[in-house]
Amino acid sequence: MLKTKIESILPLVQKPARYTGGELNSVVKNKDDVDIRFAFCFPDTYEIGMSHLGMKILYSLINSRDNFWCERVFAPDTDMEQIMREKDIPLFALESRDALSDFDVVGFTLQYELCFTNVLNMLNLANIPLRSKDRGDALDVPIIIAGGPCVCNPEPLADFIDVFEIGEGEEMMLEFLDLLNEYKKAGKSRSEFLKAASQIEGIYVPSLYDVTYNTDGTIEKITAKDGAPEVVNKRVVADLDNIFYPDKFVVPFVEVVHDRVVHEIFRGCIRGCRFCQAGFWYRPIREKSVETISEQSQRLACTSGYDELSLCSLSSSDYTKITELLEELLGWAVPQKINVALPSLRIDNFSDELKEKLALVRRSGLTFAAEAGTQRLRDVINKNISEEEILDTCRKAFVGGWTAVKLYFMIGLPTETDDDVVGINVLSQKVVEEFYSNPDKPKGKGVNVSAGVSSFVPKPCTPFQWEPQDTREELKRKQKLLLETCTSKKITFRFHNTDLTFLEGVFARGDRRLSDVIETAYKNGCTFDSWDDKFNFDAWMNAFETCGLSTAFYANRRRSYDEILPWDHINSGIRKQFLICENEKAKKAETTKHCRQQCAACGSNMLNGGKCDALNKNMV
């Protein structure tokens, strides 16, 4: 009956292929032959979700077990949602077209803070109670689980999510599903299962923790109960060569954001940029071997039919054998007319040898993250690159035939002055001049320097987690200053929406009292908040006012080192004293050497038995 109703509405919506399923390499099983059904939900549209590597890995991992079945679910766009509500069609999974309420587990990946209302909307569309406390004590209502980078501070969603997976899921997920299968067959209760699940390393059950507050709104105490651990350690996969990786990806019917084979070459980052949450959260450094990457990439290209392979990491050129890897990949990719893309290049690693290898693949614009316009501010954030390195890299690129360069910058960084802001223009203009000073520049072609300017958001688990965020008004003033001081038509600016950035900052460091705000905003009509055309800032401000909470309390105040932070019971592996030391060094514009030059004793290797591939040895 449900399948028939779904079929009847597909001709009425834009891009019906988002909702049909049946793509190449999708997995269909007999539901009567499996013990656990898992609905993997991406709280955004199909085109964005189908580009996410983590979803591809866990989808294949869960389906590699005969008794588990993982299906995909994406947030329906507004036209589809409207018809679903009119026709009383619940949210369904693509493979079986069964309602989410038929599943044992409904899992969300949280890639950015502004997807939170979509999580609530998908639960509501599935007729699943929004709040954990309203789901009863039986296992006949799906367990709601969430993972992804946002769970380094899971507290704003604490009232809605039964279980958070903290860290990397390849091993943790199967342990969790095996335990659920055991408790389901034994007829155990939901509360019994959640208490048992909390004993799995990396599993955080927020209902097993009480939070009390001081009169000034700061946290007084976070207390574990019913045997839950006082601190939840981030789960780390030790060996990337021997951990599960898919041999095929689902190939979508419609073009998606990243329509290519994606292969992860290493995890973590050696650089230690003080603003970068991913750089600290995904430590310690762990590399895959050249042989493993090449073998898995070739298999994926063969089973998917894609003609492009993108190497995925936080800083691809920091892979220790990057030239050897490119040589190995190009050995089979070029004859098969498969392009190899190398995003996330470091300015100080763009060697002549690397340039020669990249010249063998299809040419596109190069992207480099300068982050700040002045050397002083680059030292504050520990970017560890000089202006001469930036210009030298661009010079090499122009000599190599490139005519387009993208530069990434941020405004609103700690200690920033107007001179630092204007420095973005000064540096961008120097890049333009490097192009025209090249005697071998292509005839009849100009240069295009695209400056992407985002706004700094203080993030948990970074040295800047205690810093205030610039106000919306101040960020807009700095954007205007940049435009007014730019004199070149060769420079194009792209700014982030300051209202979106501001709200991201609120939720990045928020506590569980924000659950009320999220639900209120959702009931006020907020969904797809990361989309400019759907974002309703006034509705959000109304939700904060209704709940009696201040946005400035979360975004715009400096926190003291001894304040209990909402995520203090989540152990990222990074020592608090290390973060404090880095914060103090930032105030003095002092840099820290990157991990391959000298271990800074961040502590992340202790979650991996003392091992970190940054120095290729144990450092217990």
Image (cartoon, grey):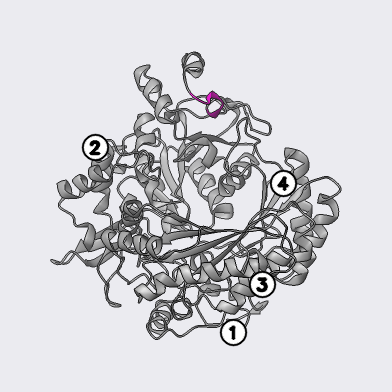
Q: Earlier in the sequence, mark 2 or mark 4?
A: 4
- Label for residue 24? none
Q: Is residue 17 magenta?
A: yes
For marks 4 and 1, give the CA distance.
36 Å
Q: Which residue is mark 3?
A: 349
Q: Look at the picture and state if 96 lies above or below 242.
A: above
Q: Which residue is mark 4?
A: 308
* In the image: residue 359, left or right of residue 368: right
Q: Which residue is mark 2?
A: 524
For marks 3 and 1, give the CA distance.
18 Å
> Which residue is at 47% across, 21% downward?
13
Q: Look at the picture and state if 614 lies above or below 130.
A: below
Q: Is the Cβ of the residue at disc 4 closer than 8 Å to that at disc 1? A: no
Secondary-structure class at tag 2: loop
* In the image: residue 390, left or right of residue 563: right
Looking at the rendered image, the disc whose residue lies closer to the viewer, 2 or 4, is 4
x, y (%) of residue 283?
A: 54, 68
Looking at the rendered image, the disc whose residue lies closer to the viewer, 3 or 2, is 3
Q: Look at the picture and state if 549 lies above or below 77.
A: below
Q: Earlier in the sequence, mark 3 or mark 1?
A: 3
- Amino acid type at image mark 4: Glu
Secondary-structure class at tag 1: loop
Q: Which residues are magenta?
A: 14-18
> Which residue is at 72% across, 41% downward?
306
Q: Earlier in the sequence, mark 4 or mark 1?
A: 4
